Image (tube, rainbow, N blue to C red):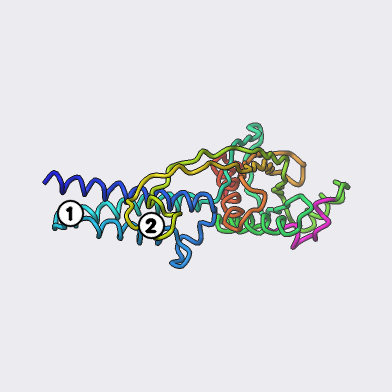
Amino acid sequence: MMTEIRHLLEAAEAAALEAGIAIKKVYRSGAFSTTLKADASPVISADINTHGILVDQPGRTNFKGALINKVVALAMLLLSMLVFTCCEPCVRLSASWIDSRIQPVRFQKILVMAIGKDLQKRMLGEDNIRKVLKTRGFNAGTSLDELGPGFASRRDTANMQRLLLDKQFDAVITVRVVGIDERDRRVPGGVYYGPVGFNQGFFGYFYQAWGYYPEAGYRETVEEVLLESNLYKVRTGELLWSGQSKAFTRNPSPAMAERYGKNIVDDMIKQGVLIY
């Protein structure tokens, strides 16, 4: 019985190590979408390797089979939880402010205006914020669609106000990047579990067992992008709400842009600045 338990513990350890290796591959690659593709998935690799380790263990019993299933299920569940957590868009609202003196107003039409030189990123941001506003029941449009790409860079505020009022916009949400911080950090190495002598060919491996190898650390560049979003009343030019967000890449995805839009719009609603 003690021998059986020892083999079970060894199998559980091997399963956990295989899942850990797969998790590290997913984290380092950043290609979380590949985790659902059988040909490229480290999840599939871990499952295959774990199955091979477990099948080779002696003393197969119904008890052992049930425990093995639980070990594999737990290892893969933990991996899946990490993968889907990492899949969440990497942007968050870090701070917000409202002018408590301003009485809440039900706006009839809201303009979304992203300020910057990259037209594609401006379009991505404006479209997703407008999409969120519409799903929350607000009438909204984008500066690119309504006024063209040059409107956001104009300086004649009186004419800008007139154009907005002519198009019946009574509120404007602006978005711009206020800073990008890059820094290097060292990611410590870990321990790799594999066959001893795997780099010595067949004759160096045949009579060897599995063992532990140290894995070297590496350096990576971490990006932090600071975004500012403001809500203005068109007729008076008053600033009603301001928020700062942190993103961890300068190349936003559609999912990240949508999450950003949800963060700022939902906070405006929560603070009572936007009323349905």
Out of 28 and 148, give the one closest to the viewer.
28
Q: Residues within 10 Å of mark 1 (few under 14, many from 20)?
A: some
Name the residue: 40% across, 60% down: 202
Q: Is residue 189 magenta?
A: no
Q: Which residue is mark 1?
A: 64
Out of 98 and 113, give the one closest to the viewer.
113
Out of 94 and 56, give the one closest to the viewer.
56
Quarter of the rendering containing residue 228: top right
Secondary structure mostly taken by the magenta-highlighted segment of the chain: helix
Residue 174: x and y in percent read 72, 47
| Mark before the other along the chain sequence, 2 or 1 | 2
**Segment colored magenta:** 141-153
- Residue 161 shows in the view: yes
Q: How many marks?
A: 2
The numbered mark at residue 46 is 2
The kind of secondary structure element at disc 2 is: helix
Report the side of 211 relative to 41 (left or right). left
Report the side of 41 relative to 187 (left or right). left
Quarter of the rendering containing residue 181: top right
Residue found at the very far bottom of the displayed protein: 39
